[in-house]
Amino acid sequence: MDKIIVEGGRPLKGEVKIAGSKNAALPILISSLLTAGMNVYTNVPDLKDIQSIKLLLSTLGAGIETDGGTVRINAGGLCIHEAPYDLVRKMRASILVLGPLLARLKKARVSLPGGCSIGARPINLHLKGLSRMGASIELKHGYVEATTDGLKGSEIYLDIPTVTGTENLMMAATLAEGVTKIRNAACEPEVVALADALNQMGARIQGVGGTTIAIEGVSSLHPVSLRIIPDRIEAGTFMVAAALTRGDVKILNCEPDHLEAAIHKLRLTGLGVKIKGNSVRVQGQNSIASVDIKTLPYPGFPTDMQAQFMVLMSVADGLSMISETIFENRFIHVSELKRMGADIIVSGNTAMVKGVPNLSGAPVMATDLRASASLILAGLVAHGQTTVSRVYHLDRGYEMMEKKFAQLGAAIKRVDP
């Protein structure tokens, strides 16, 4: 099992290009199930999660061709309605095939999903919404079994603004009869990107980016060619890395508007952030001011940046409070940061972080995707050597992270024990 070894203490300098967004690519690739024809997607990141979803789509009967960052998917031969446990268990986003399969084949059997161990993340809101649209749903032997005589437009209220729930229901509604309204919908850029892709396919979706989305069903959709948006979490991770190492990094191919909350908090730490078009230049400072954060649904501070920001606060001046309101188990990286000398006390969903002069390199173990990134960031600023184990989590969401950091001057390498 691969490990990543980091020798800390080197400021990062140079330019880094951000890859396509994993969280946008996954639902967009899945949306190809709604069409019969060749869809072409560019700027698709080369990640374990992307490989997993391509394998799942292929298992369902879709034809898939990959050429670098270009993926072609033809679901004209879609004929299988079951997404098996062995594939779905690897990644929570696999549940997104439920809506398209129901809409296209009128039946679906999808294993309950897996993914990172950061919280329960139940799919009950997906199922309630599909039931409102006329689906008959049962849970049997770890599978969701759903059938319909034809989905019907409906009024759906989400108790919480779930991203995957909004995406699943939105895809199902594109081929439903009548108008579906999703209230308290998620507003994330990835949801907007999916809606844009669906509208290019011929869907009629309005209000996306707001809390109420209206979808007027159509009889069929057609294939599209489109480019996946940049990954805002990867961009934010490199911003924090520049701040930690007191570096000077220009981040290319990003969407600064998607990171307004994170950029605002980083500026409050004293970080120099200059935005020009689709690039951001980040200049670290000798002193890092402590800042409180509270994770919230978009456009609030993203939960996927909480672990990285905690590392920054671990070496800031003073005391900061970090509140996690999205996932109940998203402080499991704290114990590993404390092994490196961080002063962190967790009480419920709040972490009190007291900055220390230095972190110390240590052997640590990744527990989830963003925790993996946070431990590598800690290694970049720590004195001595840090060895991060179980980096397969990292490969689910970051494309060649260690190579990108090495190009910026970090002493970092991947090893196969």
Image: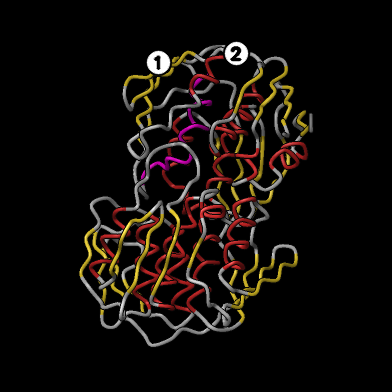
Q: Which residues are magenta?
A: 300-314
Q: Secondary structure at mark 2?
A: loop
**Label ID, residue 358:** 2
Residue 96 picture location, percent across and down: 44, 61
Real-space CA distance between mark 2 and mark 1, rounded to the nearest whole angstrom: 17 Å
Residue 191, located in which quarter of the rendered image? bottom left
- Neighbourhood count class around disc 1 (C-alpha, 10 Å): few under 14, some 14–19, many 20 upward: some
Location of mark 1 (residue): 345
Quadrant that contains the C terminus: top right
Residue at position x 64%, y 47% in the image: 251
Secondary structure predominantly adopted by residues drawn in magenta: helix
Q: Amino acid at mark 1?
A: Ile
Residue 308 picture location, percent across and down: 52, 32
Q: Amino acid at mark 2?
A: Asn
Q: Closer to the camera, 290 or 96? A: 96
Residue 209, located in which quarter of the rendered image? bottom left
In the image, residue 131 above or below residue 300: below
Left or right of 211, for residue 318:
right
